[in-house]
Image (tube, rainbow, N blue to C red):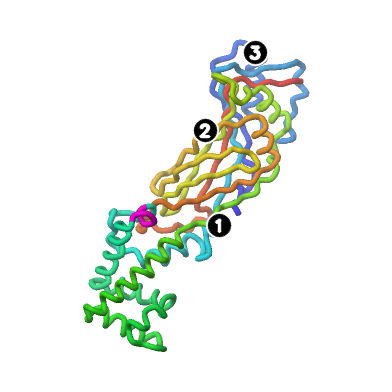
Amino acid sequence: MFHTSENHIFAHHFTRHTEPMRKLLLLLLSGMLSGACVDNDYDLTNVDSDNIAIGDEESRFRIPLVKVLVSKDEIRNSNGNIEEIFREADIWFPAQLPDGQFVDLVKLRNDSSYANTLFETLCVEMQTSNDKLSSVVDLIWDKYAAEFLPLLNLTAPDEQTFKTTFKTAYRNNAALRERLAAEITASARGYLTTALQIDRLEYEVGHIDISSDIVDMLADNLDPKGTPNARNTLFLYGQITSGLPLSLHLNPIFSPTEVSFQVEVGANRASNEIPETQLFAEDLRQIVEGITIRTSVTLTEYYPGKGFSNDQHQIVISLSLLKNGGLKFDI
């Protein structure tokens, strides 16, 4: 499950970008909105007027909505959390990567030539690096020993016998090394092409504590779906920051609405922009009442040298609303 920030709701202040207004009343109302908290204490009953409009077709109002915090433990599959998954992957990856700084996880899944180059490089590196040979043999003893016992002509060896026999054979017996390398490649391929699939993330967003007056103000004068050259519109947008040594493709869906978007999250980008996604009145009302956010996660690049941070929250998703056109009060 995702978590929201400590205050749960990140909807606090209006900020606006519009041409100076001519009427003093509208200026006063605009100032009131800019500093007002969006909560159930927000009271419009002191304004003695009907159908007040703030702004015009060129006005823009930005409204922070919610912040979602995703921990390392929530990004996982049956092999463990994201760091645990890549703890084994790091052993199967050679130090000298085909693409230099990162592993192309899309190519690893779909391009057999790329994958073969990766595994061939690993097997060669095991001949020249005692550390790499030791780390691979340790992993094989822990998880894959049964597949290698027949090759080493062993039945039920203890740990030390297995590791010593494996290392000696790999260093000194070219014919046996070739057979061991084939089995190493099979084990590495099996893990890396299946274990790097992340379970879908799911988060239940309860009722967002925004006053019904504010919701009405945003929703009531939106142009209907299909309006040509619509001016009174509402968009969801935001930013995603990530502390992971991974680039990701995310596809959140806001159920039961039809609202969804896709965003690329780069391992080496400080912030990643969520594309503006149009909302209509029924979408806004449903989001405020409560939704389920379901997010598929596709891993695209891995940067081993970057490492995993110790931060509790690895991904922060900040969502806001952008209202184009004036705001109306029916009081």
Q: Find residue 247 and report its horizontal and vertical position in percent.
A: 42, 50
**In the current view of this chain or complex, which residue is farthest to the top?**
22
Q: Residue at x 23, y 71 (%)?
A: 128
| Disc on res. 199 | none
Position of residue 121 in the picture relative to residue 79 (left or right)? left
User: Which residue is disc 1 drawn over?
Assistant: 74
Name the mark on residue 24. Answer: 3
Q: Main secondary structure of the magenta part?
A: helix
For the residue pair 122 and 305, the one nearer the viewer reads as 122
Q: Earlier in the sequence, mark 2 or mark 3?
A: 3
Q: Secondary structure at mark 1?
A: helix
Q: Position of residue 108 (x, y in %)?
A: 36, 57
CA–CA distance between discs 2 and 1?
26 Å
Residue 34's image quarter? top right
Label 1 neighbour load within 10 Å: few <14, some 14-19, many 20+: many
Q: Residue at x 73, y 32 (%)?
A: 212
* Magenta residues (range): 107-111
Residue kind at label 3, given as amino acid type: Leu
Name the residue type under label 1.
Answer: Glu
In the picture, the quarter occupied by the N terminus is: bottom right
Q: Which circle's residue, 3 or 1, is located before the other in the chain? A: 3
Q: Which residue is mark 2?
A: 276
Splitting the image into 4 quarters, where does residue 36 fall?
top right
In this picture, residue 106 sits left or right of residue 273? left
